[in-house]
Amino acid sequence: MYINRVGDADNPRFEDPSQANICRHSVKSHVEELAIFGGPPVFPYKLHVGRPNIGERSALLDRINDILDRRWLTNDGPCLQQFEKHICELIGVKHCVAVCNATIGLEILAKAIGLSGEVIVPSFTFAATAHALRWVGITPVFCDIDRATHNIDPRQAEEFISARTSGIIGVHLWGRPCNMDALVDLTQRHGLTLLFDSAHAFGCSYKGRMIGGFGDAEIFSFHATKFINTFEGGAVVTNKDELAAKLRLMRNFGFVGLDTVACLGTNGKMNEVCAAMGLNSVASMDTFIEINRRHYDRYRRQMAIVPGISLALYDEGEKNNYQYIVLEIEEENAGVSRDILEKILWAENVLARRYFHPGCHSMEPYRTEQPTASAHLPNTQWLVERIICLPTGSAVTSNDVASICALVSFVIENAAAVQERLAMGGFPASL
């Protein structure tokens, strides 16, 4: 079966219509045709997870030209001020403090809010969540997750509270909110700081309220891989006036005015060009979400009939950005493991990702410092062997999604033959 490899309503691939039928790819009909066994890949180009959204190029270039004309490249310029204002308006918070990246933002926030000793975090998250704490001298205590939501388990978090605990950080994984009611209750009863790593969750809601105004503060990432990006960047958002003022000081070396330093600080500022990209992204936000939603719906429909595959679903009663297409691979029913499927997809130029393998607790320095952590993380251990994320976003077309689904379905339908062929020859050395 051949599928036209042209652009569609989501994202026109070719500017010249005469090119529409030149680039085609086929869905496999026999396991020997799989690229891992020497056949041509389904895609002649690489499909990435998190390839950046660009938005309207001409509008971005106009903003950058204005910046160059003003010669105000950083230090709270007009683009940054406008970007911070837009973020506050979009999510309904009082303060947005934009920073050069979310990791620096969390480091500054940890110092500004007075975290110390130990902070409870999920192990199933990007390494930066734990690294930012460890970098400023705080010990991350790794908590297990709920298998259904993939988010921190508040019940186990309570078990880990000690005299050294100063706070809890929840992570809204895939943009699906934590159990915030339980975490708020828990931290209030124990007098702890509550922060949220909301790197995935910009544009999402919890019980009808936009994520960003919960806990003492939340941290957004606007890294290039996020659906709203500033090339590289992030923001701390909060409704606390005193905290916001301190964050602004600390992201700029602690300076008050031109030559007075009021506190310890660092260089965490977002520059004007990054802020301009943020404004460009925000202007296209509805379009990006619409594209993500269409891709998610197609993945959901086509993967629903594939045995051993479960797609992480979004709550249709809430606002979502639909940025992550997350599959759980149940090897017993799928017939192949997650890792085998990943290698097959990579050979076909579908660069699927094993988020967040192997879990923070299995990375350095935590693996050495906390060698027994895995004993109380059974759900995390279970999940890191099953999760795989697939391409979506404005750089992917609906035809791409249909072909990826057909490829996954083909591998699962022919799992026995795939395993037999692997037993005969194994993976090529390059994989």
Image (tube, rainbow, N blue to C red):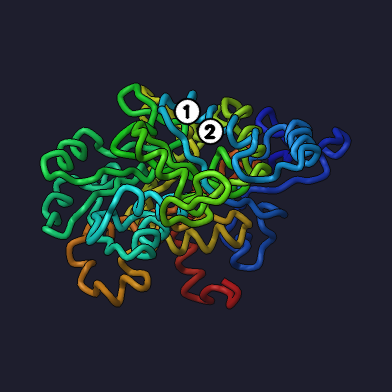
Left or right: 15 in relation to 208:
right
Looking at the figure, which quarter contains the C terminus?
bottom right
Looking at the figure, which quarter contains the N terminus?
top right
Q: On the image, numbered disc 1 is attached to which residue? A: 88
Can you name the residue that lies furthest to the front here?
259
Q: Are marks 1 and 2 in contact (CB under 8 Å)?
A: yes
What's the amino acid at mark 1?
Answer: Cys
Q: Residue at x 18, y 56 (%)?
A: 165
Q: Quadrant of residue 222?
A: top right
Q: Residue at x 29, y 42 (%)?
A: 149
Q: Does 170 sit above or below residue 426?
A: above
Q: Does 16 sit above or below residue 33?
A: above
Local packing at callout 2 (Cα closer than 10 Å; few below 14, some 14-19, many 20+) is some
Judge by depth and name the residue closer to the eye, 153 or 196. 196
Local packing at callout 1 (Cα closer than 10 Å; few below 14, some 14-19, many 20+) is some
Residue 16: image location, x then y, percent: 86, 35
Residue 22: image location, x then y, percent: 83, 44
